[in-house]
Image (spheres, rainbow, N blue to C red):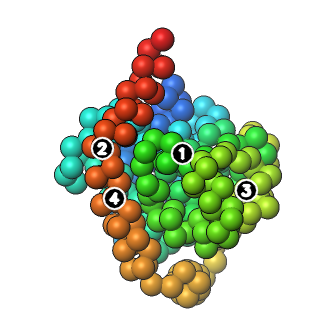
């Protein structure tokens, strides 16, 4: 495991802490690989009954490290974000998230694969794919419209507007709000309650609620094909160059 992903356990709950606070926990290739490995290992571990995602330093995650997009080459080894989001979408045990600060890009779309999400009122959710000349990823083109309705999906995917914890609660993305200091405790308490439930009945209920994962996996793959093509487009390259130029000033 990369030290940028810290893995811990508590009473049947596996906590995955994204630990790159100097970059607002932006996910690089090593972090995606570590997260995927943790999910794959816990899938067959009977002592793990639920998983909690959280971020260090006051943010959930600022999304994908754009340096990886700038340096993108079209093969699976250099694009492990797809492997991770497929693993999350197909994961059979409950997923819980504790969100404060920024939840951007995949930091937002990951939440649609979680069963329970807790956030601070000041949390900032944003899916800025179009502004980077990219299509949505992580199944967002399907899941956001299903959860929010088409009007709000257009507002937050096409316009790329951000929204806070109160709006996320109203839209049904978040289950409850808590202060930044308390949101992880709230998420962990909920995950421990899930871990204490009769396990097979819980997994069966989750499968029935979610349906076959093949449909969302097919959408994730369709998005990924368009995403990979867009990453090498002149429009996207121009947007990335402008972003890095602004950071160097």
Left or right: residue 50 compared with residue 43: right
Q: Quadrant of residue 179?
A: top right
Mark 2 packing: few (<14 Cα in 10 Å), some, or many (20+)? few
Of 48 and 168, nearer the camera is 168
| Residue identified by numbered label 4 | 226
Mark nearest the camera among 4 and 3 is 4
Q: Quadrant of residue 244?
A: top left
Q: Which residue is mark 2?
A: 233
- Give how far across and how far down residue 168 sits, in percent: 73, 56
What number is the disc on residue 168? Answer: 3
Residue at image coords 49%, 48%: 130
Tell me if mark 4 has few (under 14), some (14-19) or many (20+) residues whose alpha carbon lies within 10 angstroms of its own.
some
Q: Reading the chain from its start, which is encountered first: label 4 or label 1? A: 1
SS for callout 4: helix
Q: Which element is circle 1 on?
A: loop
| Disc 2 secondary structure class | loop
| Label whose residue precedes the other's in the sequence (2 or 1) | 1
Q: CA distance from mark 4 to mark 3?
A: 27 Å
Q: CA distance from mark 2 to mark 4?
A: 11 Å
The circle on residue 128 is 1
Label 2 to label 1: alpha-carbon separation:
17 Å
Residue 50 or 179: which is nearer the viewer?
179
* Image disc number at residue 224: none
Indicate the secondary structure of the residue bearing disc 3. helix
Q: Tell me, yes or no, whether the two marked residues, 1 and 3, touch with CB atoms within 8 Å.
A: no
Frontmost of labels 2 and 4 is: 2
Q: Is residue 3 visible?
A: no
């Amino acid at each position: 495991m990369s030290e940028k992903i810290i893995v811990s356990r508590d009473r049947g709950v596996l906590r995955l802490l994204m630990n790159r606070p100097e970059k607002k926990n932006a996910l690089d290739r090593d972090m995606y690989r570590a997260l995927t490995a943790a999910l794959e290992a816990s899938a067959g571990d009977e002592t793990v009954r639920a998983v909690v995602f959280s971020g260090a330093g006051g943010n959930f995650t600022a999304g994908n490290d754009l340096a990886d997009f700038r340096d993108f080459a079209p093969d699976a080894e250099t694009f492990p974000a797809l492997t991770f989001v497929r693993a999350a979408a197909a994961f059979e045990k409950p997923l819980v998230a504790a969100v404060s600060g920024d939840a951007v890009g995949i930091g937002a779309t990951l939440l649609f694969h979680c069963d329970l999400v807790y956030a601070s009122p000041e949390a900032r959710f944003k899916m800025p794919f179009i502004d980077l000349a990219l299509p949505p990823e992580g199944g967002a083109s399907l899941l956001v419209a299903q959860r929010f309705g088409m009007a709000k999906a257009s507002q937050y995917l096409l316009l790329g507007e951000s929204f806070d914890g109160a709006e996320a609660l109203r839209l049904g993305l978040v289950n409850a709000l808590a202060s930044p200091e308390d949101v992880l405790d709230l998420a962990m308490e909920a995950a421990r309650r899930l871990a204490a439930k009769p396990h097979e009945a819980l997994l069966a209920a989750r499968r029935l609620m979610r349906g076959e994962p093949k449909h969302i996996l097919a959408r994730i793959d369709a998005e990924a094909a368009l995403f990979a093509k867009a990453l090498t487009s002149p429009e996207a390259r121009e947007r990335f160059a402008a972003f890095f130029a602004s950071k160097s000033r």
